[in-house]
Amino acid sequence: MMDQLTAAEKELEKKKAEADADMMMAAMASDNAKEAEGNARKAKNAVRTVLNTINELLRQLGNIDKVDLSKLNQIDSALKDAKDKMAGSELDRKLKELNDIAKSQEDMIGDYERQIREIRADITNLNDIKNTLPEGCFNTPSLERP
Protein backbone atom coordinates (compact mmCIF):
# COMPACT_ATOMS: atom_id res chain seq x y z
CA MET A 1 0.00 0.00 0.00
CA MET A 2 2.84 2.40 0.88
CA ASP A 3 4.63 1.43 -2.34
CA GLN A 4 1.51 2.37 -4.27
CA LEU A 5 1.32 5.69 -2.44
CA THR A 6 4.99 6.39 -3.13
CA ALA A 7 4.52 5.46 -6.78
CA ALA A 8 1.46 7.70 -6.99
CA GLU A 9 3.40 10.60 -5.44
CA LYS A 10 6.27 10.08 -7.90
CA GLU A 11 3.77 9.98 -10.77
CA LEU A 12 2.19 13.17 -9.44
CA GLU A 13 5.57 14.93 -9.35
CA LYS A 14 6.36 13.68 -12.85
CA LYS A 15 3.02 14.99 -14.15
CA LYS A 16 3.60 18.35 -12.47
CA ALA A 17 7.04 18.61 -14.13
CA GLU A 18 5.50 17.72 -17.49
CA ALA A 19 2.81 20.36 -16.99
CA ASP A 20 5.46 22.98 -16.18
CA ALA A 21 7.46 22.03 -19.30
CA ASP A 22 4.34 22.15 -21.44
CA MET A 23 3.44 25.58 -20.06
CA MET A 24 6.92 26.83 -20.95
CA MET A 25 6.62 25.41 -24.49
CA ALA A 26 3.18 27.00 -24.86
CA ALA A 27 4.62 30.37 -23.81
CA MET A 28 7.43 30.01 -26.35
CA ALA A 29 4.96 29.11 -29.08
CA SER A 30 2.84 32.11 -28.10
CA ASP A 31 5.88 34.40 -28.33
CA ASN A 32 6.69 32.99 -31.78
CA ALA A 33 3.11 33.57 -32.89
CA LYS A 34 3.33 37.19 -31.69
CA GLU A 35 6.57 37.65 -33.62
CA ALA A 36 4.97 36.16 -36.76
CA GLU A 37 2.03 38.53 -36.31
CA GLY A 38 4.44 41.49 -36.08
CA ASN A 39 6.22 40.37 -39.24
CA ALA A 40 2.89 40.01 -41.03
CA ARG A 41 1.94 43.51 -39.88
CA LYS A 42 5.23 44.88 -41.30
CA ALA A 43 4.60 43.12 -44.60
CA LYS A 44 1.08 44.54 -44.69
CA ASN A 45 2.43 48.05 -44.08
CA ALA A 46 4.96 47.64 -46.89
CA VAL A 47 2.18 46.58 -49.25
CA ARG A 48 0.09 49.54 -48.13
CA THR A 49 3.00 51.94 -48.86
CA VAL A 50 3.48 50.53 -52.35
CA LEU A 51 -0.27 50.67 -52.98
CA ASN A 52 -0.38 54.32 -51.87
CA THR A 53 2.47 55.11 -54.25
CA ILE A 54 0.66 53.40 -57.11
CA ASN A 55 -2.60 55.19 -56.26
CA GLU A 56 -0.78 58.53 -56.19
CA LEU A 57 0.74 57.76 -59.58
CA LEU A 58 -2.67 56.84 -60.96
CA ARG A 59 -4.13 60.05 -59.54
CA GLN A 60 -1.39 62.06 -61.17
CA LEU A 61 -1.99 60.28 -64.47
CA GLY A 62 -5.68 61.09 -64.25
CA ASN A 63 -4.96 64.82 -63.80
CA ILE A 64 -2.74 65.26 -66.84
CA ASP A 65 -4.16 67.69 -69.36
CA LYS A 66 -1.24 67.77 -71.75
CA VAL A 67 1.44 65.15 -71.97
CA ASP A 68 4.66 66.15 -70.28
CA LEU A 69 7.19 63.53 -71.35
CA SER A 70 9.61 64.29 -68.53
CA LYS A 71 6.84 63.93 -65.96
CA LEU A 72 5.62 60.78 -67.71
CA ASN A 73 9.13 59.30 -67.62
CA GLN A 74 9.42 60.23 -63.94
CA ILE A 75 6.10 58.51 -63.20
CA ASP A 76 7.14 55.47 -65.23
CA SER A 77 10.41 55.28 -63.31
CA ALA A 78 8.60 55.59 -59.96
CA LEU A 79 6.15 52.87 -60.99
CA LYS A 80 8.99 50.55 -62.01
CA ASP A 81 10.75 51.23 -58.71
CA ALA A 82 7.58 50.44 -56.77
CA LYS A 83 7.09 47.21 -58.74
CA ASP A 84 10.74 46.25 -58.22
CA LYS A 85 10.42 46.89 -54.48
CA MET A 86 7.33 44.76 -54.28
CA ALA A 87 8.83 41.95 -56.39
CA GLY A 88 12.19 42.15 -54.61
CA SER A 89 10.66 41.90 -51.18
CA GLU A 90 8.70 38.75 -52.10
CA LEU A 91 5.89 39.94 -49.83
CA ASP A 92 3.37 37.36 -51.01
CA ARG A 93 5.72 34.47 -50.27
CA LYS A 94 6.78 35.96 -46.93
CA LEU A 95 3.19 36.64 -45.92
CA LYS A 96 2.14 33.09 -46.80
CA GLU A 97 5.14 31.72 -44.90
CA LEU A 98 4.31 33.83 -41.85
CA ASN A 99 0.66 32.77 -41.97
CA ASP A 100 1.73 29.11 -42.21
CA ILE A 101 4.06 29.54 -39.22
CA ALA A 102 1.31 31.27 -37.23
CA LYS A 103 -1.15 28.44 -38.04
CA SER A 104 1.43 25.83 -37.02
CA GLN A 105 2.10 27.64 -33.75
CA GLU A 106 -1.62 27.96 -33.04
CA ASP A 107 -1.92 24.20 -33.57
CA MET A 108 1.01 23.60 -31.21
CA ILE A 109 -0.55 25.86 -28.57
CA GLY A 110 -3.84 24.00 -28.88
CA ASP A 111 -2.03 20.67 -28.50
CA TYR A 112 -0.12 21.93 -25.44
CA GLU A 113 -3.32 23.19 -23.87
CA ARG A 114 -4.97 19.81 -24.48
CA GLN A 115 -1.97 18.01 -22.93
CA ILE A 116 -2.01 20.35 -19.94
CA ARG A 117 -5.73 19.65 -19.39
CA GLU A 118 -5.02 15.89 -19.54
CA ILE A 119 -2.09 16.18 -17.12
CA ARG A 120 -4.16 18.25 -14.71
CA ALA A 121 -6.93 15.64 -14.88
CA ASP A 122 -4.30 12.95 -14.14
CA ILE A 123 -2.97 14.98 -11.22
CA THR A 124 -6.49 15.40 -9.83
CA ASN A 125 -7.07 11.66 -10.20
CA LEU A 126 -3.78 10.83 -8.45
CA ASN A 127 -4.61 13.26 -5.64
CA ASP A 128 -8.03 11.62 -5.25
CA ILE A 129 -6.36 8.21 -5.04
CA LYS A 130 -3.82 9.52 -2.53
CA ASN A 131 -6.56 11.10 -0.39
CA THR A 132 -8.67 7.93 -0.34
CA LEU A 133 -5.83 5.70 0.86
CA PRO A 134 -5.89 5.20 4.63
CA GLU A 135 -2.96 6.26 6.77
CA GLY A 136 -0.76 3.32 7.67
CA CYS A 137 -0.92 -0.27 6.50
CA PHE A 138 -3.87 -2.47 7.38
CA ASN A 139 -3.52 -6.18 6.79
CA THR A 140 -6.74 -8.02 7.35
CA PRO A 141 -6.34 -11.58 8.58
CA SER A 142 -7.81 -14.30 6.48
CA LEU A 143 -11.06 -15.64 7.94
CA GLU A 144 -10.75 -19.06 6.40
CA ARG A 145 -7.81 -21.30 6.71
CA PRO A 146 -6.76 -23.54 3.91
Image (cartoon, rainbow, N blue to C red):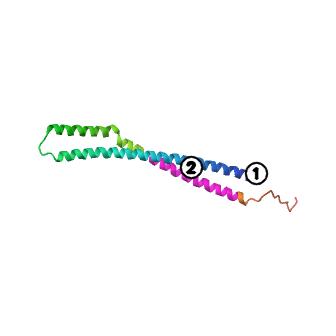
- Mark 1 and mark 2 lie on one chain; the one further toward the N terminus is 1
Label 1 – label 2 distance at C-alpha:
30 Å
Q: Residue visible at 22% across and 44% down?
A: 57
**Magenta stretch, main secondary structure class:** helix
Amino acid type at image mark 1: Asp
| Above-or-below relation of 37 to 142 | above
Q: Is residue 106 left or right of residue 44?
A: right
Q: Give the labeled residue for mark 2.
A: 23
In the structure shown, which secondary structural element does the residue marked by tag 2 occupy? helix
Residue 46 falls within the magenta-colored stretch: no
Residue beneath disc 1: 3
Residues drawn in magenta: 102-129
Percent of width and height locating residue 121: 62, 56
* Residue at the farthest left position: 66
Residue flagged by tag 2: what amino acid is it? Met
- Please report the residue visible at 50 percent of the width from the left and 46 percent of the height from the top: 29
Quadrant of image for the C terminus: bottom right
Q: Is residue 74 above or below residue 40?
A: above
Relative placement, left or right, of 21 versus 52 is right
Q: Pinpoint residue 75: horizontal percent, then vertical percent.
A: 21, 40
Q: For the N terminus, give its image quadrant.
A: bottom right
Is residue 30 shown left or right of residue 15?
left
Between 63 and 136, the one lying in front of the other is 63
Which quadrant holds residue 90? top left
In the image, residue 29 sits, relative to residue 80, either above or below, namely below
